[in-house]
Image: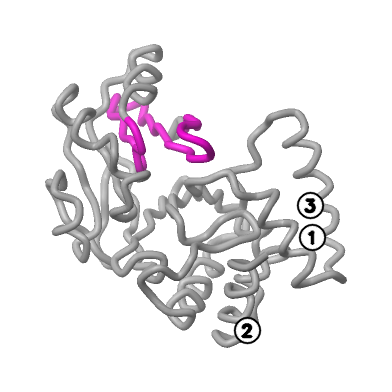
Amino acid sequence: MLEIIRIPVLSDNYVWLVHEPESLETMVVDPAVAEPVLAEADKRGWKITQIWNTHWHPDHTGGNAAIKEATGCQIIGPEAERERIPTLDRFVKEGDTARLGDVVADVIDVPAHTAGHIAFYFPTEKAAFVGDTLFAMGCGRLFEGTAEQMYDNMRKLEKLPDATKIYCAHEYTKSNGEYALVAEPDNLALKERMAEVLTLRERGEATVPTTIKLERATNPFMRAASAEQLAARRIAKDNF
């Protein structure tokens, strides 16, 4: 039901423009900047009515104010980071929902990359917007949280249905995969996936969204057997 458009910005960010055709509502997930987002919506004749933020980092919120000024949209984001995102109008946490037209998303707390990071999951659409928590074959750096928190995040997300599309916020797949091959050198599914990723990147094509099924098979952080193993892999990736 939802139309989801990928907008590449900055060096490797993806902003997601999401349109619900029945209500004609359109929202933006994590706008790093405003101009290309407004231009894409205008090109399609869509009026932006909402912004959803997963966390406070400027490359996810930098376009908030200008888009709000241009459209009058409502901005929704993590309650735990309300002081760090001054443009927010509504504050949400796990157990809350967010709505685009008649399509409802569950809010999931996924702290670790930042202390109040959240994700938005649309059960009817099998789509999740996860910011910088889960990447294709990777996870976010532990800037404000712990490996134990990230391990718990992986357990929450791996329970989503196989076909769930994961809309992350960066094109990190090639570098993530290069490390993943070191972490799990005997993983055949990972080797096959990396061959596909390299082909896509050589063509200049995006590698996301990914799926929960793919991540269960190839993501060394989701596949970590313990928080301790995840921590060791995160340190190794940080220094890779």
Q: Say whether disc 2 or disc 3 marks the residue closer to the N-terminus.
A: 3
Q: Quadrant where the C terminus lies?
A: bottom right
Which quadrant is the N terminus positioned in? Answer: top left
Q: Residue at x 62, y 84 (%)?
A: 229
| Residue drawn at the location 66% of the way across and 74% of the way down | 223
Expressed as whole percent of the image width and height from the top left, the position of residue 176 reads 66, 57
- Asked whether, in this view, residue 63 is left or right of residue 197, the answer is left
Q: Residue at x 19, y 34 (%)?
A: 65
Among the 4 quarters of the image, the one containing residue 22: top left
For label 3, the residue is 193
Residue 145 pos. (x, y %): 38, 75
Q: Position of residue 197 (x, y in %)?
A: 75, 44
Q: Are marks 2 and 1 in contact (CB under 8 Å)?
A: no
Q: Is residue 99 magenta?
A: no
Q: Are marks 2 and 3 in contact (CB under 8 Å)?
A: no
Q: Is residue 190 above or below residue 71?
A: below
Residue where numbered disc 1 is placed:
190
Is residue 5 within the magenta segment? yes
From the viewer's perspective, is residue 108 above or below residue 28? Answer: below
State which quadrant residue 235 falls in: bottom right
| Marking on residue 229 | 2
Q: Is residue 193 above or below residue 47?
A: below
